[in-house]
Image (cartoon, coloured by chain):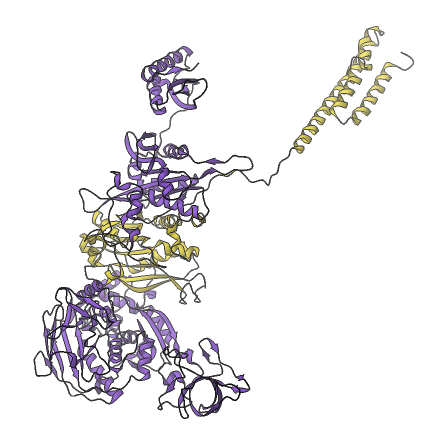
Amino acid sequence: MKITFNWLKEYLEAENLDPEEVSTLLTMSGTEVKKLDYVGERYRNIVIGKIIDFYPHPNADKLSVCKVDIGSKRLNIVCGAKNFDREDKVAVALEGAVVEGQLIRKVNIRGEVSEGMLCSEKELGISNDGSGIMILDQGFVVGESFSRSMGLDDIVIELEITPNRPDCLSVIGVAREVSVLTGAKFVIPWHDRGKEIKLKEDSLDGDLSISIEDYKLCPRYSARIFYDVPKTPSPFWLRNRLILCDLRPVDLIVDLTNYVMLETGQPLHAFDKDLLVSNKIIVRRARSGEKIRTIDDVERILDEDMLVIADERRAVAIAGVMGGKETEINPETHNVLLESANFWGPGIMRTSKKLGLRTEASNRFEKKIDPMLTIFAIKRFEDLLTKITGYKSETSIYDNFRRVQRERKIDLRLAKVKKLLGKELDSHTVSNILKGLGIENTVERDIVKATVPSFRFEDLEREVDLIEEIARIYGYEKFDIIPPVCSLRKGGYSFQQKVIKNLRQTLCDIGLNEVINYSFLSRSLFESFGLHLEKEYSNPVKILNPITEDFELLRSSLLPSMVRNVKNNINHGIKDIRIFEISRIFRKSENSKAPVEKNTLGVILSGRAKAKGWDEEEEFYNYYHLKGILEFISSKFICSDFVINPQEYRFFHPRVSGDVLIEDSKVGIIGKVHPVLLEKMEIEQDIFYLELNLDDFVSKVEFERKFKSIPAYPSVEIDLAIVVDEDVKNYEIEQEIRKSGGKILRNVRLFDVYRGKQIEPGKKSMAYSLVFREEERTLKDREVEIVVEKILDNLKRKFGARLRS
Amino acid sequence: MGNVSIDEKLNLELESFLKDIEATESLDELEKVKTKYLGRKSFLSTVLKNIGTLDPAERPIVGKKANDVRKTIESKINDKEKYLKDLEFEKKLREEKVDLTLPGKKLPSGKKNIISKVIEEIEEIFIGMGFEIAEGPEVETDYYNFEALNTPKDHPARSLHDTFFISEDILLRTHTSPVQIRYMESHKPPIYIIAPGKVYRRDYDVSHTPMFTQIEGLAVDKDINFGNLKWVLQTFAHEVFGKDRKVRFRPHYFPFTEPSVEVDVSCNICDGKGCRVCSNTGWLEIMGAGMVDPNLYSFVGYNEEEVSGFAFGMGVERICMLKYGIDDLRLFFENDLRFISQF
């Protein structure tokens, strides 16, 4: 919200308020000042001048030479505009002024000296009109500063008002804050000048009646009719104040409604009274499908949750949000009906949200403003109208108001202040701060009995709310910094957190980079990976209100987004990619409304494992690099090995696709991304992908190891090469060797796989190195031979294996 | 054997040897010297061979003398041989062609994501103060995300959180604050936790991403006060941004804290004088905080007269941006390896 410093000062009795100081005090008490804009500075060296005489430039057809009186002297100014005459008052930029970024200097234009510049409204930043120079009203005084004459000699204060302080969405609200912060007295400078106005409760007396269908939605509706309003344009000071506060001037009546809203916080709406079908105002729910064209010229379709202001024929305004086009103030308006009402905040918020229409009015209403403001705002409107135009009105204010309790008593214990804030404050300090905020109170021993006024009724409900008021006005910086006194305790990570942290570090240490993707996935990407056809992944969580189709689903696998990371990096020229991500994946749950979330690790290898170096050959990533990572993880974190069980997934190469098991339970998948999929995505290199469910993985992890004594007796190493059918898997052979080898077999390691000349087609040779050892003695050769024979026998029986000679 | 005595001759032979060995510069020459003085045809061999022909009285004297000479010669040759071998080896080493400036063998280097790195750094600061790490679901219920955080339906503060919905009351959490409620529900004070995690808001432009990262904090105990909040958060800010930075506590509003605070540190770019980064204020906002609103205690079944506490929340990406001078939020989720590998 923007207000101006001069405006603020109208409500304060203070000689020397320093804007910087006020700004700091506001910020440090919770009304954050985002920016102070010294707009007056922009008009330095621009004054009011009067054109005494002018004649065509002797050497240029399109220019004139003007003699301009600026009070202290007369200037010679060359001007290109034609829209002026003698005696016209104009804005003169003198030497040293800056207009549209240009420094004004004394120059010679084709033989004529020009000692300044006559400015257009556009050049002055007042409007977009650059067609000619700005001609000022005759009331302006020659020699005076332009900015002062125009009400532009001001400072714009840009504030961030928190949602709990609707009272501060107004000049008056902010002035109250400044008052308690600086000690400057808060005053209402116009209040007494207004005459007493009769209030009429909901009664038809010929002029107007107000009917409210539901007082919850509209606790109060006040209105007044102004007959024969003068057609005076808004004075410059009014227009400029609105411009400075980011509102667009329209005409006097509309400008005044906006001005009073900024000043008091009470939104007003003006109807052309003669465009209403009767003298009856109805505040009712909209009918389902009811239409209204709002003043922004958009047709809005309403529903029954929305509140409208209607006459007896149709809706004429969306209550608290925006008025209707048909009844708006227009150049022909004679009689104005001014609405100053109070609407139920949540209702306005819903309406505004549903319509996608947020206005200055709805923003205020949705935060629940004080219903006591309505009459005050109407009075201020009249006060300004009278001051500007001399207009006098004898009409009554109509006021339909279901009175509610708007005063609240709260007991504030000084002991509680001390307990919560850590500092003892005396009753005098506490009482004075509250009084400064307009909260009347009396002190009874250690309790301050406070009465919350209507304008703070919504946000000051409890003792703690008053304690906050005291803390922020007293100043947060004045509270001591105190280390907490508590018993010593153990902080730290849980086991799972430790494992995951360690895993992240491990993966980085072996050269992988960590990516973090959005949890979202588009349906098209989801389906292009065939995830909708894979049972485990086919149940993704849908977002009801995605921003774009990229955010339609929550990921049920990390694969698609990580493949996209590969693609994007290739586009940047990075082709050797090893990345991992640790994030949650989401799947619909069968027995709960909330989905299942699983901590998941994704790893991708693609491109070269090694670049060609001066002493090494280029090497491309393959499946076994990825499996190596898995084995490294297993040696670092767990005792049991990962086992790969071939299993086809649509997104993987049919032969390079498997489940990752630990102790026979599935913890993940591993494979080579399907070449057809990559072709579709225009990726021209292999991608290998591993996904581990970390929750399952962590349950298998054993960080702590037990010591085993170092072998005291030598071991015997035997190499065994066998020939088997192609289909026989290494894992099956190894399992059999281990089983047959018994307890003296300590280690089995495959060291060669051979297909070729000496082996018949359809077969392969597998060579294993076996290590035998006995714990308590040296093994005899014969013992080992017996075991090896047994192994061979079993391999022969199970797999038709024969010893390779 | 002429006029000159054998003894004399042996002396002459030794003298000659010493001269020769002195002049020897290679193992080949040394071999020749060795043959010349110790070989079968050498003077010394001749003397020793013919010793039997000598006068028996002379024999032991000549014999001893000859042996002494031989030992001297042998030892000198050995020394010289060792010396020459060392020299030759040294020469061979020096002749090896090595370019020490060739590149070393590459070990792959991987980097943690900057977000993880900063989360871990922050976790360690709080763990040092006795905090534990808590977690909560990213898909939340309306109750935990809003209702129990003192933000009922139609509360104006809800409009600050544009929310992604899964169903009418299941949503993507808009902040990590629901962890506060979940943790308090399942634990009794004293509570000292922080909760890092992903959060989601329906906002997507230059300065907003639909997903970002927050760290929540909560301390609830018998006698926690506002001064304690200031101590913990100032200590944190000094650890992350440096002890020389000023820390400022400014009143603000959050539905679930009362009083509420925003914490600023003095701008490191302009040293508090005001610049573009700090929008000319000299201060950078780093987090929101406040004393836990007593309404929350009633949601989790605590007696508000018996406990008090503070909570805080910060955006990890913002902390990263301020700490590392990163000027574009979108970089965090583009996963450009040229960005990731920098940290």
In the image, A693 versus B303, the foreground residue is: A693
Residue A767, compared with residue A60, is above or below; it is above
| Residue A708 picture quarter | top left
Q: Position of residue A30 (x, y in %)?
A: 30, 67
In the image, A377 versus B58, the foreground residue is: A377
For the question of whether residue B235 can be seen, the reply is: no
Q: Is residue A40 left or right of residue B187?
A: right
Q: Which chain is yellow?
A: B
Q: Position of residue A442 (x, y in %)?
A: 19, 73
Residue A176, compared with residue A768, is above or below; it is below
| Residue A25 picture quarter | bottom left
User: Given the current orientation, which residue lies at the most extreme front position?
Assistant: A61
Q: Position of residue B68 (x, y in %)?
A: 77, 17
Q: Is residue A112 left or right of residue A424?
A: right
| Residue A664 picture quarter | top left
Q: Quadrant of the C terminus of chain A?
A: top left
Q: Quadrant of the N terminus of chain A?
A: bottom left
User: Given the current orientation, which residue lies at the most extreme right position?
Assistant: B3
Q: Position of residue B82 (x, y in %)?
A: 70, 25
Q: Which chain is purple?
A: A
In the image, B33 versus A576, the foreground residue is: A576
Q: Is residue A102 left or right of residue A384?
A: right
For the question of whether residue A21 can be seen, the reply is: yes
